[in-house]
Image (cartoon, rainbow, N blue to C red):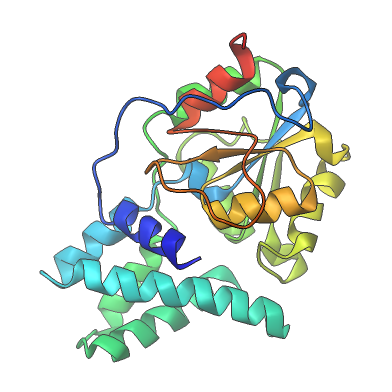
C-alpha cells in the first residue's frame, strides 16, 4: 500500500501526465464489456487532487511536497485504522486530523487559517481534463453512472454540481453512509445494493491500486485509471483492464477487441 500512497502524492504534487493511454488489457475474464449495465467511479477517478498540493506549496514554499507526503500517508492510515477499529469519522474529519499530525510531525508553524484553507480545498476540486467528454459519451451510450467513494456525499454532490455533471450521475454512494471506508467489502456491496444489479453487471473504475484489489476481492469487474502508469499491487488479483485516463475507459468499452 505504501507504493500507492507515494504514487498519489507524486500525482497530487503535479507530476506531468502522459497524454497517451495505456492499452487496455484483453476482454475481462468475468464479464464482457457489452455486459455492463452500470459504472461506479471512485471519486479520484473523476476529481483532480493536484490543486491541494499547489496550495500547500504556496502556503509553505519549498515544503509543500513534504507536507503532502506526510499528510496523505497519515490520511490513508487513519481511514483504514478507523475502519478496522470501528471508530468511524468522516473523510473531512480524518483529513483534518491527519493534517494536524503532519504539521506537528514536520514542525510546521501552521495557522488555523492556513489549515482551514487546505481542508476547504478538498471540497473545491476540479475534474480531470477529459472527464466531461468521457462521461457524456458513457451516459449517451445508455450506461448508468454512479459514484462509489470514501469522500462524503456532500463533497461528491457539490463537486458534480460545481462542474455541471450532476445530471450525468444517477447515484452517489459514499462509504460515509455506512460508516466505513474502502476496501471494507461492505463498501463495495453498496454498488450492488444501490444500483440493484448483479456485481458482474457493474464495472468499478478505480484510481488506486489498492482499490482495484478491494473491488476484485469483492467480485466487481474493475477498470484501473492508472494515470501514472504505476506497477500493479502484488495481492493476487488484477484489474480486468487499465488505461491512463477515462478516454481509455471509453475505448475499452466501445472499441472492438
Above or below 167: residue 34: above
User: If the image is split into quadrants, where does the C terminus sit?
Assistant: top right
Q: Residue at x 80, y 62 (%)?
A: 186
Name the outermost residue toward the left.
61
Q: Quadrant of residue 177?
A: bottom right
Residue under the point 30% across and 89% down:
105
* Residue 89 in sight from this viewpoint: no
Q: Where is residue 197 in the image (x, y as percent from the top left)?
A: 87, 37
Identified at 30% across, 56% down, the residue is 10
250 over 79 or under it: above or below? above
Query: Hey, which quadrant is residue 178 in on the image?
Result: bottom right
Which residue is located at x 29 percent, y 38 percent? Answer: 17
Total label count?
A: 0
Left-right relation of 29 to 67: right
Q: Is residue 147 left or right of residue 220?
A: left
Q: Nearer the viewer, residue 66 or 3?
A: 3
Q: In this view, does 149 lie to the left or right of 95?
A: right
Who is closer to the viewer here, 33 or 57?
33
Vertical side of 57 occupied by 39: above or below: above
- Image location of residue 159, percent across then percent down: 50, 47
**Depicted 236 relative to depicted 117: above or below:** above
Question: Is residue 124 visible to the viewer in this orientation of the structure?
Answer: yes
Residue 67 percent location from the top left of the image: 27, 74
Amino acid at each position: 500500500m505504501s507504493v500507492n500512497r507515494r504514487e498519489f502524492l507524486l500525482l497530487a504534487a503535479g507530476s506531468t501526465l502522459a497524454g497517451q493511454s495505456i492499452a487496455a488489457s484483453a476482454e475481462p475474464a468475468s464479464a464482457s464489456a457489452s455486459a455492463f449495465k452500470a459504472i461506479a467511479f471512485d471519486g479520484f477517478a473523476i476529481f483532480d487532487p493536484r490543486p491541494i498540493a499547489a496550495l500547500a506549496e504556496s502556503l509553505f514554499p519549498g515544503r509543500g511536497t513534504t507536507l503532502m507526503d506526510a499528510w496523505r500517508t497519515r490520511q490513508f492510515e487513519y481511514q483504514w485504522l478507523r475502519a478496522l477499529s470501528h471508530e468511524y469519522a468522516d473523510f473531512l474529519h480524518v483529513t483534518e486530523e491527519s493534517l494536524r499530525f503532519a504539521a506537528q510531525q514536520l514542525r510546521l508553524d501552521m495557522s488555523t487559517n492556513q489549515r482551514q484553507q487546505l481542508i476547504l480545498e478538498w471540497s473545491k476540486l476540479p475534474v480531470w481534463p477529459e472527464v466531461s467528454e468521457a462521461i457524456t459519451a458513457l451516459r449517451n451510450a445508455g450506461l448508468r453512472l454512479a459514484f462509489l467513494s470514501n469522500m462524503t456525499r456532500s463533497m461528491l454532490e457539490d463537486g458534480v454540481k460545481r462542474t455541471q455533471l450532476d445530471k450525468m450521475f444517477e447515484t452517489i454512494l459514499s462509504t460515509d453512509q455506512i460508516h466505513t471506508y474502502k476496501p471494507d467489502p461492505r463498501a463495495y456491496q453498496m454498488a450492488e445494493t444501490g444500483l440493484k444489479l448483479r456485481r458482474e453487471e457493474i464495472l468499478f473504475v478505480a484510481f488506486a491500486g489498492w482499490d482495484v484489489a478491494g473491488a476484485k476481492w469483492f467480485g466487481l469487474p474493475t477498470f484501473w485509471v492508472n494515470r501514472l502508469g504505476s506497477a500493479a499491487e502484488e495481492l493476487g488479483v488484477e484489474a480486468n483492464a487499465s488505461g491512463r485516463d477515462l478516454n481509455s475507459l471509453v475505448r475499452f468499452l466501445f472499441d472492438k477487441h
